[in-house]
Amino acid sequence: MNMQERNISDNNFEQCIKCTVCTVYCPVVPVNPLYPGPKQAGPDGERLRLKKGLYFDDTLKYCLNCKRCEVACPSGVRIGDIIQSARIRFNTESPKLRDMVLANTDFMGSIATKVAPVVNMTLGMKPVKAIMDCTMKVDSHRTFPKYSQGTFERWYKKNVKNFQDSFPRHVSFFHGCFVNYNYPQLGKDLISVMNALGYGVHLLEKEKCCGVALISNGMIDKAKRNAGVNTESIRKSVYERQMPVIGTSSTCTFTLRDEYPHLLGVANHDVRDYIELATRFIYRLIDEGKVKLVFKKGYKARIAYHTPCHMEKLGWGIFSTELLRKIPGVELTTLDSNCCGIAGTYGFKKENYKVSQAIGKPLFDQIGKLKPDFVACDCETCKWQIEMSTGYQVKNPISILAEALDLISTSEANK
Amino acid sequence: MGHLKKDNEFDVIIVGGGITGAGTARDCALRGLKVLLIERHDLATGATGRNHGLLHSGARYAVTDRESAEECIKENMILRKIARHCVEETEGLFITLPEDDLEYQAKFVESCLAAGIRADVIDPKEALLMEPSANPDLIGAVKVPDGAVDPFRLTSANVIDAKLHGATVLVYHEVESLIKDGDTIKGVKVFDHTTKQTKEYYAPITVNAGGIWGQHIAQLAGARINMFPAKGALLIFGHRVNNVVINRCRKPANADILVPGDTICLIGTTSSRVPFEEVDNMYVTADEVDLLLQEGEKLAPKLASTRILRAYAGVRPLVATDDDPSGRNISRGIVLLDHETRDGIKGFISITGGKLMTYRLMAEWATDLVCRKLNVDKACETMEIPLPGSEKENIDEISKKTWSKPGTPHKAVVGRHGNRAGQISMSSEYDASLVCECESASVGEVRYAIEELDVHNLVDLRRRTRVGMGTCQGELCACRAAGMLAEAHKCTETAKQDLQSFINERWKGMYPVCWGDTLRESEYSQWIYSGVCGLTGEGSTEKI
Amino acid sequence: MKFDTIIIGGGLAGLICGIRLQKAGKKCAIVSAGQSAMHFSSGSFELLGRLPDGTETERPLEVLKQLPKEHPYSVIGEETVAEYAAMVPMFLEECGIKVSGSADKNSWRISPTGERKPAWLTLEEFVSLPDKDSKIGNKALIVNILGYLDFNTKFLADSFEKQGTECRIVSLKLDEMERLRKNPSEMRSTNIARVMDREEVWSKAIDQINSMIKDEDAIVLPAVFGLKDSAIIEKIRTRLGVKTYFIATMPPSVPGIRAQMRLKAEFEKCGGYFFLGDTVKGADYNEDGSIRSIETANFGNIRMYADDFVLASGSFFSKGLTATPFGIIEPVFGIDVKAEDSRDNWFDRYFWNKQNYISFGAVAKNGLHASKDGKTVWNLFLAGSIIGGYNALYEGCGGGTAIITALYAADEILKK
């Protein structure tokens, strides 16, 4: 008899003992009174929703899905997952055009990169911004991330693909939409670093957008399809090609690992542990004594590291910061744990702009006080938000590593 | 009854604020009688509030008790019409497990049909689609029109309607003695627990609707009713595991019904005889809990890993037939006793036996007899007229009509009060703020309950609003609600004692099932109330 | 990843232990599954309020020897407890936490419902009274924020009036708070405090209070000020001019959260690693039964190694202990636990009586070592409410045992 030895409920919602700690750490509650708060929207509301779907409250859309409530919860309740899965199950509103545009990062990217200068110029023009603001409800304060001319994938195939097999060890790279369409340089940096460490970098057989924006904008069917394709490609990489998968975006990585099984019902337990953030992967290799880093002489930087919300949830900020600390000449401050407010596409929406900036204010203030040379961060949307709101440049730790490493000596050391 | 009466004179006095008394009060009031309803505690404190909350289709009794089954299905259909805000039309399944006799199913279906109960044999796979939490090993399933009914809400709605039709309702008034004139009962002498005064009320007819405690009321009149208290223990789980009632298709036995009710579900019952002296103090034993779990797991295996909120027990008011003082021939049907013909006591009748499901019919019978005795010629209408709150529309429609942007708390209020939700102020932000977050009960709703629904203390409030019925069992809401009661009743000391009694009342249901997260929750409550607040239970009283 | 010491649990005990070790030059990591019970703090730490037999104690240090031998104070030794107790105020001060009170004689804190409870050290905004029935003043103005339900002004007034203080209850209405009220469930202490932290808001509140004061000689306010920075508390006191009593609210506790944030900041400032939202999944052991490394949910295949481990994982609430219908276990290492077998002996039917289950916990050997299958685990130390053998709630000694066992465990590690 295994009577009552364990309490099992969806997303542990029943383990909630109503201590209210989650509401203390919710970044939305203090700035948006329309949001019922994580406890009410999550485990409390869930009991009513289990009774009847009509108890679903559409104010759940104000949840950023930052998962800070989950990090704070002493009971292990996956509060963010409860809220998002309730939205998936009960939301009846169909996504607006604006949300579709924002959510389909890969589709929009694939079109925009072909005509990048025009798109960038157009999106930057005041009248266009005004039209976007009025008709699309995309806030006019927003600077749109610039699209790159030509995708990362194209660059990769043309320039580096042919010699990746020559390395002794191999990884697959989940580059994500940002690297592919907006900022291929980060992907290039990753390849320099990994190659120097003796790793060949390969693309997945098929890569779709991780789907984080689709989930938050309610396009679940498409998110599920993407999740299926990605997980299958990852499975092939891990089991057929013996290549673990690394990413440079904390949000993509988190989505591939945890949101797929928890929110989309796409099982990935056989591959989850092989999906890693590049900084963690490199840190682990150093920790295990498998690779060596040789740094340039005279590299100096005062860096402030911002831990993105999903990085807090992963608990992996330590690997990025420890890696940066290994660079001689780096003076690193870890910023207080605060949400930047952008939360993917959330902050782009006109109705959320004010809230988004209010959420980020403590972070922006701290950066302003600290006056670092630049900010380091593993998330691209945080990057946009911080750059727009503070004027400070934000770099991915992998790019910093690429700058600071003596790539030739490192290659020698890892031969 | 046209002639003027003094304030303490009525046409009929009804003793007992359970569902039978409340239903009888309503029926009498609807027929134009001047009614007084007296209850020594709060409404629905006895067996009324301590059962499954099952809207029986009657199927359970079909094989063994055809008469009860027929009564059930008729009343079932009536309650769906007149008490829609108290009823959930969930449907029910009778499942046969490998260890059960599948032949019983045929007999069962045949008996159901004979009693007028729809009973469809369905494929086990279909049954699992209908209710995924049911035991997947099931070998047979029958679909019947079971449902869920909220006994507190049902009692409250009957009382509201009685009051709307002129009835006077006195809770926390205990009958000390019956006023006799020779062989006639002229009225009652009651003790008011709030003011500590004794008062007298008069009426040509007194109705004893005291349930198990009716034996005592009858004694006061000089009549003898042999009640046989049967204890039934139940467990409440933290959320709805099932949305369809699950029964075992076998002869009625322990723990063979799992009913979804509001935000929870509950399994029961056990059955054991208890001495009459213990009926006021029911404790659930560890053995009963274990038995309920072992059997419950068979209905829905998920129960083995679902958090249990509390355990409680009720007492079935079973009555021995008159010629059988030993109690061997116990009737489960309705027992209406005219003590004038039975015992030579005029002006006194007893209505007992029966069950929650048949309360309306019991009330109809009792009221018919009252009317005959008072020479009132008016037919019963309770099978037609909806209860207050159940007039029309569903939760969504009412919410949208009442508020421009109904959120979860608004819908929760409508779910509990139906059409009467409009009387609850949720318009100001202060009124909309939540007292009880688990069940979404607002300041406005609590105030409405205190002002309109005869709420004297936190336990009463819980029965009207579900404050403190959620997973935390009153952890934070109790203190907030106590503050509001202190304000409303202008007595802080009582409110503080009441808070401590309430916490203890919640604990009484928790400790029998206190492990896992329920123990974590209890420890947290202990910290808050004994630790941070430093309360010691001083002045608290043991309440039901 | 290698550390000198890994502490499991980031509450009061874990943080104090971590700060002590970190300051002594050890490299420490704290693994904490969510936020701690400091979020529900009463505003005071207690050393000892009464003995297990119910005798109230006025001077805790003088009765330590009467405690049973399995009590953590007895395991540490009464003299050592006294030494630590004397040192704690300074230790906290260095972490930026100002306290008042002394171990020599208990003072009395005022609870959210107006009860008086014995206290040892009291956080800065609170006033702890010298005697159980000390009057707070002749006339008190009790001020709440309109619509805030977790501050029970009626209960407070009732208890002050019993001591002969005449009370008047008023509510503040502030436009900035009206915004909060739009949310039906989040008119809570921390959210109020976030708004109150802004100078223009608390300043306006003080003006309003000043305009309402008549002849009162005491002002009573909910402790919803100074979530980030306690400096405003002194400013408010000065501006009000009248003796001001901040009273703890129902949870969450603003002063408790502030104290927790200070301790965490101090730990990190000293170079400690705090891993929030992570849980220990398993451990591997050396041949002598000592712990070699642990595996956590977030670190996954990167194991965490340390020379010493401190288990400060709390009691049931924090999942330091797990109760099943069949018994009580310590879920991280499966170490020995002292508890009653039969569920019937866990509880008292009356909520307000002493509850046995609260005294259940890990067996603490000499030096606060844990034991497994009866054998001492030489590099695993216990701190805080995971330790069994005492009823923190009944005896009124939760804060004291947490702080003192944490310091002691740290010093035992440093002695090695």
Image (cartoon, rainbow, N blue to C red):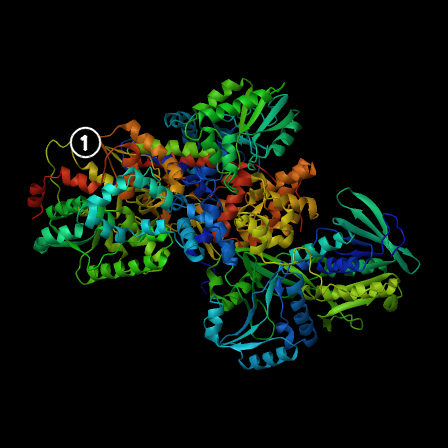
Q: How many marks?
A: 1
Q: Residue A205's spot in the image, x, y percent? A: 19, 60
Q: Is residue C246 left or right of residue B62?
A: left
Label 1, on which residue?
A301
Q: Chain of mark 1?
A: A
**Considering depth in this image, is A317 or C35 the residue closer to the camera?**
A317
Q: Residue B369's quadrant in the figure?
A: bottom right
Q: Residue B54's quadrant in the figure?
A: bottom right
**What type is the residue that disc 1 sits on?**
Ala
Relative vertical location of residue B88 with respect to residue A99 in this rendering, above or below = below
Residue A124 appears anywhere in the view: yes
**Considering depth in this image, is C64 or C105 the residue closer to the camera?**
C105
Q: Residue A165's spot in the image, x, y percent? A: 9, 56
Q: Is residue B15 left or right of residue C269?
A: right
Q: Secondary structure at mark 1?
A: strand
Residue C408 appears anywhere in the view: no
What residue is shown at x 15% (from left), y 46% (from top)? A188
Taking the view exactly as shown, the residue that stands out farthest to the right is B182
Relative vertical location of residue A415 with respect to residue B155 in this rendering, above or below = above
Q: Is residue B480 left or right of residue C201?
A: right
Which quadrant is the N terminus of chain B positioned in? bottom right
What residue is shown at x 80% (from left), y 58% (from top)? B217
Q: Residue C62's spot in the image, x, y percent? A: 50, 29
What residue is shown at x 17% (from left), y 59% (from top)? A242
Q: Residue C296's spot in the image, x, y percent? A: 31, 49
For label 1, the crowd category at 10 Å Cα-Cα, with few meaning under 14, some 14 to 19 and many 20 or more, is some
